[in-house]
Image (cartoon, grey):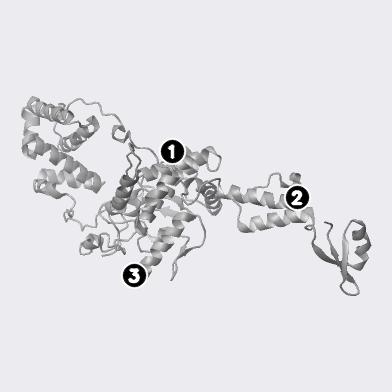
């Protein structure tokens, strides 16, 4: 099967959409032509949304003991009767402890079905769903808590979790609803394939194609050094297992050494090697559930919340701008962002964005504790130069954050040149300069040749 890049089912014109095994008990509803036309119309935009609405519609009809034809007939000929059935069903669910937000979801499918077939009905129960009521026990994990979660995961799931927690990716970017697409190695331009995959630069760039983005606009984010390390190991593991990696290969593959989803290899949807979204989050869900502190509930999407909240802290510390944080998360940037970060990034902007992400990386990392690693390096260099006798005035404004290795080396050389040689350093000088240096406190060591001598710097 050719690789699918549109994010939509690969169906020939005039052919019905494949059902697959996902619909389960509600597949029978599609034998009704009216239900089928409604479901296919919704699938044109989102197969996930179409299937969710069909399930909601099916469960509600089961509880009301109605079929699609009968529910339309009641809505038109006896709307009060249908209203009473819906009210009694909602009251029964409330007595069972269900939230209003849970109950109202079942009405969404019926509302959509009625709208599609132009059935007028205003008798839906009046409910008061509270947004986020089901997430009241959820909070963002700390880096230490997330590290314990990562320790419980297989290598493949650890890579998935870090893509969500450090790059802010939605699970559907790594593996779509029906495995029709996902992120590929070509979307990681800094990755160099070979016997041992490596990154040319870290943090590495992650380019999310428009068909995988929730906003249907492509965007750029970054992968941390911690993610790069896990991903290199995962790709090496796949290569050792006999997989030939190419730019078109999925970042997260259906065939893993743990055999996750291998039972589906015969399904033509998986021929391209991509995984379903459920496979991306399945093991992560179990690890989060078993690691959550008492009274706390975690679901896989909390990893994306972790990325957002940690970058918010980095923003507060001046490490990254708000617009870049929103761009990394793949959010709609509005009018201001549409003309800046919403455009294709040039080399200068990409370099600045990478440096900003690097400054913020310590807020995301679970690999270590304490102060920002770049700040720690700056502090260590300050202490080293102080021990060498560098005056405090020379160290003012010393900042290594966001600098490359070459820039740091050049900075050290500049400071070193400004303060002269280290105490006790021996140096070959011209004989004509010896008297002047001896007066300055230098110590004669030995003659070198007829025109040079070795002196030692003052103690």
Q: Indicate the secondary structure of the residue bearing disc 3.
A: loop
How dense is the environment of label 3, judged by Cα within 10 Å: few (below 14), some, or many (20 and up)?
Answer: few
| Foreground label between 1 and 3 | 3
Q: Position of residue 374 (x, y in %)?
A: 58, 50
Q: Earlier in the sequence, mark 3 or mark 2?
A: 3
Per the rendering, the mark at residue 89 is: none
Relative placement, left or right, of 393 versus 116 is right
Quadrant containing the C terminus in the rendered view: bottom right
Per the image, the residue denoted by label 3 is 241
Query: Which residue does the image show at 49% across and 39% down from the upper left?
Result: 313
Q: Give the number of marks.
A: 3
| Foreground label between 2 and 1 | 2
Per the image, the residue denoted by label 2 is 390
How dense is the environment of label 1, judged by Cα within 10 Å: few (below 14), some, or many (20 and up)?
Answer: few
Distance, label 3 to label 2, CA atoms, is: 55 Å
Per the image, the residue denoted by label 1 is 334
Please identify the quarter of the rendering in which residue 347 is found.
bottom right
Q: Position of residue 241 (x, y in %)?
A: 34, 70
In the displayed structure, would residue 2 be above or below residue 393?
below
């Amino acid at each position: 099967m050719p690789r699918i890049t549109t994010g939509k089912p690969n169906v020939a014109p005039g052919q019905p959409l494949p059902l697959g095994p996902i619909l389960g008990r509600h597949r029978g509803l599609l034998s009704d032509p009216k239900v089928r036309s409604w479901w296919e119309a919704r699938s044109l935009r989102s197969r996930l949304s179409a299937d969710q609405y069909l399930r909601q519609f099916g469960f509600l009809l089961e509880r009301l003991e109605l079929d699609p034809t009968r529910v339309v007939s009641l809505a038109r000929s006896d709307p009060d009767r249908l209203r009473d059935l819906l009210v009694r069903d909602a009251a029964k669910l409330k007595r069972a402890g269900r939230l209003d937000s849970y109950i109202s979801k079942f009405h969404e499918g019926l509302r959509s079905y009625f709208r599609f077939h132009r059935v007028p009905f205003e008798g839906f129960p009046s409910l008061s769903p509270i947004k986020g009521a089901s997430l009241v026990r959820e909070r963002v994990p700390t880096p230490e808590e997330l590290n314990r979660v990562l320790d419980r995961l297989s290598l493949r799931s650890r890579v998935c979790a870090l893509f969500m927690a450090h790059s802010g990716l939605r699970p559907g970017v790594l593996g779509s609803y029906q495995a029709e697409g996902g992120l590929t190695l070509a979307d990681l331009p800094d990755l160099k394939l070979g016997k041992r995959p490596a990154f040319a630069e870290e943090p590495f760039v992650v380019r999310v194609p428009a068909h995988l983005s929730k906003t249907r606009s492509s965007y750029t984010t970054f992968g941390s050094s911690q993610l790069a390390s896990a991903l290199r190991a995962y790709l090496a593991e796949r290569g050792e297992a006999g997989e030939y990696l190419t730019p078109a290969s999925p970042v997260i593959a259906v065939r893993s050494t743990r055999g996750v989803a291998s039972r589906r290899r015969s399904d033509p949807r998986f021929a391209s090697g991509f995984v379903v979204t459920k496979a991306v989050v399945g093991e992560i869900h179990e690890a989060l559930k078993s690691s959550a502190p008492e009274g706390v509930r975690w679901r896989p999407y909390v990893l994306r919340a972790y990325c957002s909240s940690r970058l918010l802290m980095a923003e507060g510390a001046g490490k990254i701008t708000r617009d870049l944080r929103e761009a990394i998360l793949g959010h709609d940037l509005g009018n201001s962002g549409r003309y800046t970060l919403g455009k294709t990034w040039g080399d200068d902007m990409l370099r600045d964005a990478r440096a900003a992400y690097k400054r913020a990386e310590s807020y995301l990392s679970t690999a270590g504790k304490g102060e920002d690693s770049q700040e720690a390096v700056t502090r260590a260099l300050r202490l080293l130069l102080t021990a060498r006798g560098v005056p405090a005035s020379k160290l003012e404004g010393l900042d290594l954050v966001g600098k490359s290795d070459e820039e740091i080396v050049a900075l050290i050389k500049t400071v070193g040149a400004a303060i002269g040689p280290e105490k006790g350093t021996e140096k070959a000088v011209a004989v004509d300069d010896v008297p002047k240096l001896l007066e300055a406190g230098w110590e004669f060591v030995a003659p070198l040749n007829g025109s040079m001598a070795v002196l030692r710097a003052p103690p």
